[in-house]
Image: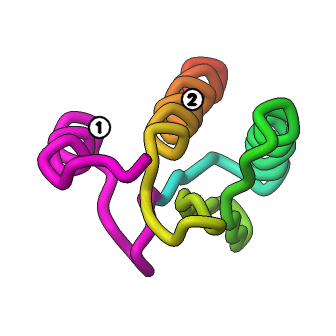
Amino acid sequence: MKLEKNKVYEFLKRHNWSIELESLYKKYIFSNFSSAISFINEIANISEEKDHHPKLVNNYNIVEVFWITNDVGYITEKDIELAKNCDKTYLNYSKNEI
């Protein structure tokens, strides 16, 4: 089900995501390559469980995440749910890197 635009914009505002390539987008920065790859692997495991997969781009310690429901071509509630999960996962990494 397609989300109302105001719900998507509220999510963007509250969670510091943006829209890139018609997808929910966020860039995460880690202290090193290993942490970035561990984060990717954790997101991959969650994605497999939910049968919903993001576009992930890695460049050394930077991971870019794009969520969109490809089979319908727009952002759905599932994308928002999994984007929030990315933030939660990143927060755990941030705590461990301090």
Mark 1 vs mark 2, CA separation in Å: 11 Å
Q: Which residue is mark 1?
A: 15
Q: Residue at x 65, y 66 (%)?
A: 71
Q: Residue at x 17, y 50 (%)?
A: 9
Q: Nearer the viewer, residue 59 or 43?
A: 43
Q: Residues within 10 Å of mark 1 (few under 14, many from 20)?
A: some
Q: Residue furthest bottom?
A: 21
Mark 1 or 2 closer to N-term?
1
The amino acid type, in three-letter code, at marker 1 is His
Q: Residue furthest front?
A: 1
Q: Position of residue 95 (x, y in %)?
A: 56, 19
Q: Position of residue 58 (x, y in %)?
A: 72, 68
Disc 1 to disc 2: CB gap under 8 Å: no
Q: Which residue is mark 2?
A: 85
Residue 7 belongs to the span the image colors magenta: yes
- Residue numbers of the magenta segment: 1-26
Q: Residues within 10 Å of mark 2 (few under 14, many from 20)?
A: some
The amino acid type, in three-letter code, at marker 2 is Asn
Up the image or down, 33 lies above or below 49; here it is: below
For the rendered model, the colour scheme is rainbow
Up the image or down, 12 lies above or below 20; here it is: above
Q: Residue at x 21, y 49 (%)?
A: 4
Q: Write down the quadrant of residue 66 in the picture.
A: bottom right
Position of 83 with respect to 89 (left or right) is: left
Q: Residue at x 29, y 37 (%)?
A: 15
Q: Quadrant of the C terminus?
A: top right
Q: Nearer the viewer, residue 13 or 68?
A: 68
